[in-house]
């Protein structure tokens, strides 16, 4: 869970997740949306991968990134349980 919070703490990584909500993208497609180097973007993607928030798949000579939806479902469940209010 710590790696997830670390991954979500950066605005560039949150923007990556927002973009990947729309469609799977390669590094080069994502790079068009950021004023950072390809190396920096790859570093952000690596952090998101280690947090299990994105997955990658090689297609031809490109690597495409997508959201790991099962991870987001698990996070949602954890948050719902964490903030559940028991009314008696």
Image (cartoon, rainbow, N blue to C red):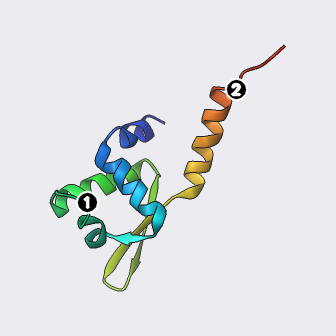
Locate the C terminus and report the quarter of the image it occupies: top right
Mark 2, residue position = 84
Count numbered badges in the picture. Answer: 2
Q: Residue at left 35%, top 52%? A: 15
Q: Residue at left 66%, top 34%? A: 80
Q: Report how far apart the C-alphas of labels 1 and 2 lie in the structure.
A: 37 Å
Which comes sooner in the sequence, label 1 or label 2?
A: 1
Nearest the viewer among 44 and 83 is: 83
Figure quadrant of residue 28: bottom left
Question: Going by the image, does 35 lie left or right of 1?
Answer: left
Q: How crowded is mark 1: few (under 14 residues within 10 Å), some or many (20 or more)?
A: few
The tag on residue 66 is none
Percent position (x, y) of residue 13? 33, 49
Q: Residues within 10 Å of mark 2 (few under 14, many from 20)?
A: few
Mark 1, residue position = 42
Are the residues at dot 1 and dot 2 in contact (C-beta closer than 8 Å)? no
Percent position (x, y) of residue 9? 35, 37
Percent position (x, y) of residue 51? 43, 47
């Amino acid at each position: 869970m710590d790696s997830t919070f670390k991954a979500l703490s950066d605005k560039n990584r949150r923007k990556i997740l927002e973009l990947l909500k729309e469609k799977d993208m390669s590094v080069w497609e994502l790079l068009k949306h950021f004023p950072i180097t390809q190396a920096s973007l790859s570093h952000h993607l690596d952090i998101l991968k280690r947090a299990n928030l994105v997955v990658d798949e090689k297609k031809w000579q490109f690597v495409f990134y997508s959201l790991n939806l099962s991870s987001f479902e698990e996070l949602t469940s954890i948050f719902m349980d964490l903030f559940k209010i028991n009314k008696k």
